[in-house]
Image (spheres, helix red, strand yellow):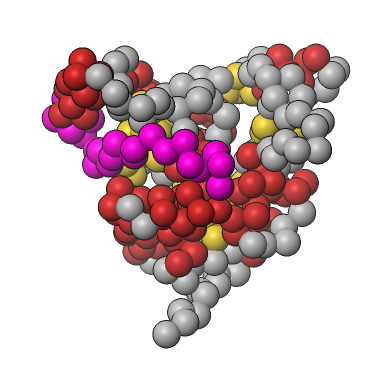
Amino acid sequence: MRRTKRHAHDSSTRGIFITATDTGVGKTLITAGLVVCLRQRGIDVGVMKPIETGVSRSAKAQPDGVRLRKVTESHDPMAEVCPYVFRLPVAPLSAARAVGTTVRVATIIRAFRVLRQKHNLVVVEGVGGVHVPITSSFDMLDLIHQMKLPAIVVGQSGLGGINHALLTLHTLRRRKIPIVALVLNQRRPVQTKSARVQEQSTVSLLRQLAGVPVLGPIPYSPSVNRNWNEGLSRLAGTAPITKLARLVLASERGTRSRRS
C-alpha cells in the first residue's frame, strides 16, 4: 500500500542537523541515505546545505546540494537549498573572503524557515566539523544552536575516530544541543587484520563512552560513486540507517510532545 505523505505547514515543523567530526567522513552519503529512508516511510523531507565550498564549474560535477535535492525529488529553489556556493575548497570564511563577500547568517535562517514551512522535516547538512568558521565571529556550532535543531554526528570508524567523536559530542553538549546519534562510517576498505582490530576497538569504546546511540559502521562501498541512486537505495535499507530514521522520528515526536 502506498503511504500518504505527511505534511506540516506550521511554525512547529522541525528538522535535524547533520554535522561531522571532520571533513570527508561521509556526511553527504549518510544525509542522502537518511533522506531516502525517511521518504520511504512517507515523510515529506526537505534538504538544506546552507554553505557549500569546493564547487567545480565542470558540467560533470554534481555539487552536494544538487545531489541532495534530487534525492528529495522536490522543486525547492537552489537558493533555498544551498544559499551560499563557493568555488574554493576551503572553510566558508576563507571561501567568502576570496570572492569579496560575507556569509549572512540571516539569509541562511530565512531560507531554512521557508523550507520548514513546505516540508514535514528538513534535513540540514553542515560543512566539515562544528568549529568550521562561517564568519569571523560565527561558526557551524553557532548555526546549529541558532537553528534550534538536534544533531547527528558522522564520524570515522577507524583509527583516530574516538578522539574526534568524543570532542565533537562534548562540544555539542556544552552548548546544550541534543544529540540523536553518532554514525560511524568506513572511510576506506578494511583489508588488514590490524585495520579490523583498530575499527573494532574504536566502535567498542565509543559505544561505552559516547553516551548516545552509536550506529554502524557503515561499510565502505565504492559502488556508490559509480551508481549513486542504486547505492543510496541499498544504504537506505541497512540496519544503521533504518535505526537512524527511527531515532530521528522519535526525536521529532518528543520535541512536539514537549511543546504541547
Q: Residue furthest right?
A: 100
Q: Identify the residue at image location x=21%, y=29%.
A: 203
- Quadrant of image for the C terminus: bottom left
Residue 7 location, quadrant: bottom right
Residue 38 location, quadrant: bottom left
Q: Identify the residue at image location x=38%, y=34%.
A: 220
Q: Position of residue 74 (x, y in %)?
A: 67, 62
Q: Identify the residue at image location x=36%, y=27%.
A: 189
- Quadrant of image for the N terminus: bottom left
- On whether residue 214 falls in the magenta region, the answer is yes
Q: Identify the residue at image location x=70%, y=40%.
A: 62
Q: Position of residue 82 (x, y in %)?
A: 70, 42
Q: Is residue 201 left or right of residue 70?
A: left
Q: Is residue 215 left or right of residue 66?
A: left
Please tell me whether residue 43 is drawn above or below residue 213 in the rendered image. below
Q: Taking the image as drawn, is residue 202 in sight?
A: no
Please tell me whether residue 101 is drawn above or below residue 77 in the rendered image. above
- On whether residue 102 falls in the magenta region, the answer is no
Q: Position of residue 235 (x, y in %)?
A: 41, 50
Q: Of 251 and 65, which appears nearest the observer?
A: 65
Q: Of 154 and 148, which appears nearest the observer?
A: 154
**Magenta stretch, residue numbers:** 205-227
Q: Taking the image as drawn, is residue 201 in sight?
A: yes
Please tell me whether residue 64 is drawn above or below residue 20 in the rendered image. below
